[in-house]
Image: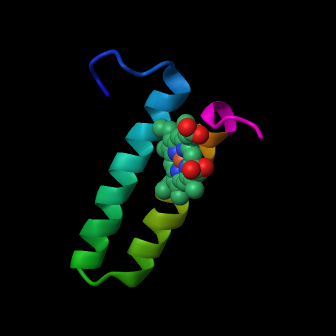
Amino acid sequence: MADGRCPDKVRAEAAKQLQEGGAAVAAAAAAKNVDEARNALNNSVLASCKGCHGTHRPKK
Ligand code: HEC
């Protein structure tokens, strides 16, 4: 995504959040830290879905 394929900043930010959030969930899960994994999932991964869809997902 760092090679100019991103259409705009919203998508770039959401993609970054999704990537980092996913890594945070995986790290917390590996450490068996359930609360931290849940936090990262809710605050980063799920928030990124919404951030990008609000702008980029075609309306029906
Ligand atoms: C970087 C932007 C971006 C992020 C982040 C993102 N999405 Fe999407 N998503 C899209 C776009 C764009 C579409 C519309 C694709 C199309 O219709 O061609 C879409 C469509 C979808 C659809 C509908 C697919 C379909 O066939 O109609 C689902 C379900 C979905 N996303 C789930 C998620 C979930 C769950 C997350 C978070 C874990 C997520 N998305 C994160 C951009 C994103």
Q: Is residue 21 above or below residue 55?
A: below
Answer with left or right where residue 53 lies relative to residue 42.
Answer: right
Tell me the residue at 40%/73% (across/down): 36
Q: Is residue 48 visible?
A: no
Q: Is residue 55 above or below residue 24?
A: above
Asked which colour scheme the image uses, the reply is: rainbow
Q: Quadrant of residue 33?
A: bottom left
Answer with left or right where residue 55 lies relative to residue 18.
Answer: right
Task: Give residue 23's position: percent from left, percent from top.
Answer: 29, 57
Tell me the residue at 55%/28% (across/down): 10
What are the residue bounds of the magenta stretch? 54-60
Q: Quadrant of residue 24?
A: bottom left
Q: Is residue 4 above or below residue 44?
A: above
Tell me the residue at 68%/38% (across/down): 54
Task: Give residue 17's position: percent from left, percent from top.
Answer: 43, 44
Q: Quadrant of residue 12?
A: top left
Task: Give residue 16's position: percent from left, percent from top.
Answer: 39, 39
